[in-house]
Amino acid sequence: MLLLGGAATVEALTGVDYRLASFLIPWGVILYTASGGLKATFLASYIHTVIIFAVLITMIFVVYVKVYSSDQIYAFLDQTVSYTQEDCEFIFSSGDKSFYEKGTYACGPVSGNNSGSYLTMLSADGLMFGIINIVGNFGTVFVDQSYWQSAIAARPSSAARGYLLGGICWFAIPFSLATSLGLASTALQLPITASEAGAGLVPPAVATHLLGDSGAVLILVMLFMAIVSTGSAESIAVSSLVAYDIYREYFNPDATGAQILKVSRIVIVVFGLFMGCFSLALFEIGLNLGWVYLFMGVVIGSAVAPLWFMMTWKGASGTGAVIAAWSGLVLALTAWLVAAQIQSGEITVATLGSNEVMLTGNLVAIFTSAIIHVVYSMFIDKTDYDFSELDKNITLVEQDMSGLGAEQQDPEELDKAYKWISRRGYVLTLLLIFIWPLASVPAGKFTESYFAFWVLIAIAWGFGAAIVITVLPLLESQDEILTVLGGMFGACCGKKKDSTEEEEVPLSKEVGDEEDVVKKVDEEGEVEVVAEA
């Protein structure tokens, strides 16, 4: 999905053909992901995220500090909805000919909004989009293997805090970016069509308008960072599923680490090429980023409830989860198609993409699967699963226990982390989904001071998130960073370790190996090979 919008943006800013961009962009992902694996993904994700937030706060600063103010943007938005049909035709014209079409450009009052204004939370389309967004993003988090993989790779306590803090920081991207570049596009009456906005071209258009070529470069860099970071995580996730859950499970149960690594690298290359082909296919049939984003929940929303029940409810049936997910998908697609036929009398890309139709499909997906799974688990396949048995069915590759210390396997620590994240997760969900939107309802159409406060929150959130996402990982990893830098300094300066730091062990024979090896004992008592005799 991100590649779909990325290729469109690259074409708009640079003139590179969309088809070529769809295949060139994934190669940036393939090269370092195939060679570096999960560690490269983690490191690259940090660097990319820092760059993304640097561009984000730059755009916020330019819109609300350097060029305009919240009061000016408010006045422009208020004036935009006051324009008549004739005014809009004059604004969007070239010479004596107008190219304005109602519904294509953001001009005049907004249907379904309080007072026809953009400065309100009382919006029919906004409410529908919000619900669709929640269902779709529930699906992306629950179904996306990269989230699970990152959580498993981290310590339980770190994963709990990291995901909560990461979610809060991530929210700055849609919130602060929409408040700055999104509102600026309408306030400044830039000639951006609805289809162009759906393709994700609003940020590059505003950035280019405000900063010229420099703005275009910044958005391109930001976009490339986002695509490569996300693409890398997805490539690792897909390769892990294929290598561990398919290849090792069904074809080679005794696979070694080297064999699994080889399969993973092959899958990364194949998946990267598939991303380009799939993006091109979506483009050719007339789908853009916005359409696919709304449709996302229809396809994957039915897996949310079954996965949730399987993780938290010992009575959840495994068979019921599979049946519920697939049944929910079939019902969601059926409801989606029927809703388009009822609303418009025909089924086309345009009619299937309306908010009402997409909302229908999303809601059917998430609720029907939940009902089916609960009914199946309670009345057809009653289960009483013992979660303590879960670890016994997990086999390690070459019995590699690295990273699995006592803390990572302590039931009390795991339960403590679970309770910590659950309480705060529910509170944050309640705050963002219900309390905040409902608290904005009495305001109706925002006043100038209320909008200024809204902008202040967006700016503070963006800058705060940028600081946290940049500084906190460095502070948490300072010991490891200092160790690496110390090793690099020692290697460059020819400094040797003190003899007390390691202890030589007499020559020994590896089992089944005819060559002698020299071993050493490190500070943690682990034995490792340092040289072959």
Image (tube, grey):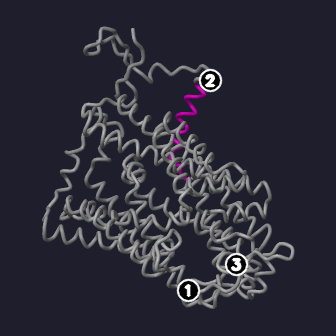
SS type, badge 1 = loop
Query: What residue does disc 2 label?
Result: 492
SS type, badge 3 = loop
Q: Is residue 122 magenta?
A: no
Labels 2 and 3: the sequence-earlier one = 3
Query: What residue does disc 3 label?
Result: 101
Q: Amino acid at mark 2?
A: Cys
Q: Name which quarter of the figure residue 440 lies in.
A: bottom right
Residue at point 62%, 71% (across, down)? 458
Q: Residues within 10 Å of mark 3 (few under 14, many from 20)?
A: some
Q: Is residue 474 visible?
A: no
Residue 115 location (% of width, % of height) = 63, 91
Report, in whole angstroms, how far the alpha carbon at label 1 lies from the one at label 3. Answer: 25 Å
Residue 188 location (% of width, % of height) = 76, 74
The one nearer the camera, 170 or 360, is: 360
Q: Residues within 10 Å of mark 1 (few under 14, many from 20)?
A: many
Labels 1 and 3: the sequence-earlier one = 3
The one nearer the camera, 65 or 370, is: 370
Q: Name which quarter of the figure residue 241 lies in.
A: top left
Labels 2 and 1: the sequence-earlier one = 1
> What range of the chain is rendered magenta?
472-490
Image marks 2 and 1: residues in contact by CB distance under 8 Å: no
Please, is residue 281 above or below residue 372 in the view? above
Q: Nearer the viewer, mark 1 or mark 3?
A: 3
The one nearer the camera, 434 or 135, is: 135
Q: Amino acid at mark 3?
A: Glu
Residue 246 location (% of width, % of height) = 30, 41
Residue at point 40%, 67% (across, down)? 298
Q: Is residue 487 magenta?
A: yes
Query: What residue does disc 1 label?
Result: 122
Please, is residue 269 above or below residue 335 in the view? above
Residue 97 location (% of width, % of height) = 82, 76
